Amino acid sequence: MTLSICGIVENLLLSYLKKMEEVTMEFLNEFMLPVVLGICLCVGFVVKKWVNDVDNKYIPTICAVLGIVLAAWINGWAITPQIVLSGIVSGLGSTGLHQAFVQYLEKK
C-alpha cells in the first residue's frame, strides 16, 4: 500500500505535535509551582485593581520577581537556576492565567 506525500507529511506532523505536547507538559510539571502561581495571581490582581500608581506593564515583572522569591522560600532559600526558572515560569504564568480568564469572561 502506498501512502501519498500528503499522508506522510500529515503523519509526521501529528507525531511531532504529540511529542511537543508531551515535552510541554513535562516542562510545566517540572517547573510550575501551583502555590506560587496562585499567590502571584492574587498579588497581580490586587496591584492591578487597587494600586493606581503602578502601570500595568510592570505587573508581569512584579509577578516574576515575586515568583522567584516565593520559589526560593519554598525551597529553603536555596537559589539554583531551576528554582529561579520555576519562580519565573510560575510568576509569569499567573499573568497569562489572568489574561485567559479575562478573555473567557469577555466572550461569555
Image (cartoon, grey):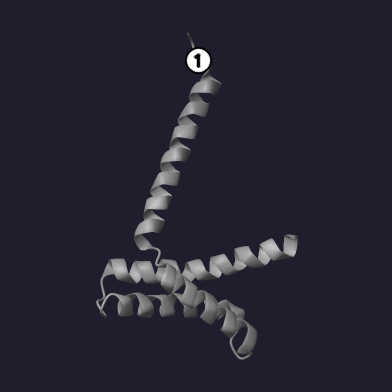
| Percent position of residue 106, x then y | 73, 65
Q: Residue at x 43, y 67 (%)?
A: 34
Quarter of the image that includes the C terminus: bottom right
- Residues 56 and 75: in front is 75
Residue 16 shown left or right of residue 98 in the figure: left
Against 9, residue 20 (above or below) is: below
Q: Residue at x 42, y 72 (%)?
A: 35
Q: Secondary structure at mark 1?
A: loop
Q: Residue at x 64, y 90 (%)?
A: 52
| Percent position of residue 16, x then y | 44, 37
**Residue 18's image quarter?**
top left
- Tag 1: Cα neighbours inside 10 Å, few (<14), some, or many (≥20)? few
| Amino acid carrying mark 1 in the image | Leu
Q: Residue furthest top?
A: 1
Report the number of numbered marks: 1
| Percent position of residue 29, x then y | 38, 57
User: Pointer 1: what residue?
Assistant: 3
Q: Residue at x 61, y 63 (%)?
A: 100
Residue 95 shown left or right of residue 72 in the figure: right
**Residue 58's image quarter?**
bottom right
**Residue 59's image quarter?**
bottom right
- Residues 58 and 42: in front is 42
| Percent position of residue 54, x then y | 58, 87
